[in-house]
Image (tube, grey):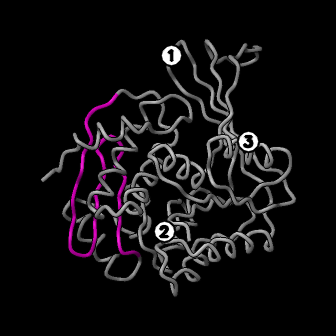
Amino acid sequence: MPDIVTLTVNPTIDKSTSVDSVASEVKMRCAMPTFDPGGGGLNVSRAIKKLGGTSTAIYTAGGGTGAMLTTLLQQEAINTLPIAIADRTRENLTVYEESTGLQYRFGMPGPNVTESEWQGCLDAVLAAEADYIVASGSLAPRMPQDFYMQLAERVKPTKSHLIVDTSNEALEACARAGVFLLKPNLRELEILSGQKFSSEDRLIEITQDLIKSGMTEVFVISMGASGALFITADEAVKMRPPVVPIRSKVGAGDSMVGGIVWALAEGHSLHDAVRYGIAAGSAAVMTRGTELCRKDDVFNIYDRIAIVD
């Protein structure tokens, strides 16, 4: 039985390149592109691997890009379980502008995933019987917005711990099912709660009310460079990482989730797991493109995370 399974229903191949400057109506000469697996759950699996852990990545894969995606994952020694779909796996594009240091990110909507195909994803996840299930990333365009809620309902009678990292309607639907851990940002938490936060104390109070209502057992509220709030029914802790050089924010949230679930699977306390997650998220912004976090950076930052009173 695997410790960790990740689920990515709308994965992508992330193509990255650079150009001196971005301009309209001009043929821009780009550098040789790099290709990386992309999509929330796949990035979580990649971050776990970089930290020395293992996971099984379950994801949809279709067409030539789907086959290429599996090859890229296997080259990184990720355990793969692709779910075949008839439509073609998407590609995204990131362009780094050398003259300004700015980054331009172009995200594509994704393939049509049929009901039988997404039901196959649910079946594969449940069959794995993992200790930790990470469902992360966007849904494909025609998938039901309550897909993650359906997953949560099926996971609930099992011993698995479900971690969900998504946004918009897919995140709102999760509120009706109850999961182990949710990782929204402040804006997403306001949408979930239907309230604006007048202070941090009020934020904690509202969040703990959501936990007591059965929405989730744990909230890890992402606050960007300010770190994160780790909240349970009985505890609220704010953790802040040190200032680090920012080269790319791509994959920072996925690295954060990867750090959390890796640490939990390794037997660390929930408190320490969140600390590892913040360290992994901070380490990810230190790398360019879609490289994600580096193990040495994660451990270095972990030791320098401050607990804010």
Compare residues 181 and 123 and report the one nearer the observer.
123
Residue picked out by circle 3? 91
Mark 1 or mark 3, which is nearer to you? 3
Q: Residue at x 28, y 64 (%)?
A: 269
Q: Secondary structure at mark 1?
A: loop
Label 1 vs label 3: CA separation? Answer: 25 Å
Mark 2 or mark 1, which is nearer to you? 2
Residue 151 belongs to magenta span: no
For marks 3 and 2 on the same chain, the one whose residue lies earlier in the sequence:
3
Residue 224 belongs to magenta span: yes
Compare residues 60 and 160 and report the one nearer the observer.
160
Q: Residue furthest left?
A: 309
Q: Is residue 304 left or right of residue 32?
A: left
Which mark, by number, is residue 100? 1
Can you give x and y, in whole percent of width and height, for residue 250 in the image?
Answer: 52, 38
Which mark, by number, is residue 244? none
Q: Quadrant of the N terminus?
A: bottom right
The magenta segment is 216-244
Q: Residue at x 30, y 64 (%)?
A: 270
Label 2 vs label 1: CA separation? Answer: 41 Å
Q: Secondary structure at mark 2?
A: strand
Identified by mark 3, the residue type is: Glu
Identified by mark 2, the residue type is: Tyr
Q: Residues within 10 Å of mark 3 (few under 14, many from 20)?
A: many
Residue 183 seen in this snapshot: yes
For marks 1 and 3 on the same chain, the one whose residue lies earlier in the sequence:
3
Quarter of the image where one finds residue 112: bottom right
Asked if labels 1 and 2 touch by Cβ distance under 8 angstroms, the answer is no
Residue picked out by circle 2? 132
Asked if labels 3 and 1 touch by Cβ distance under 8 angstroms, the answer is no
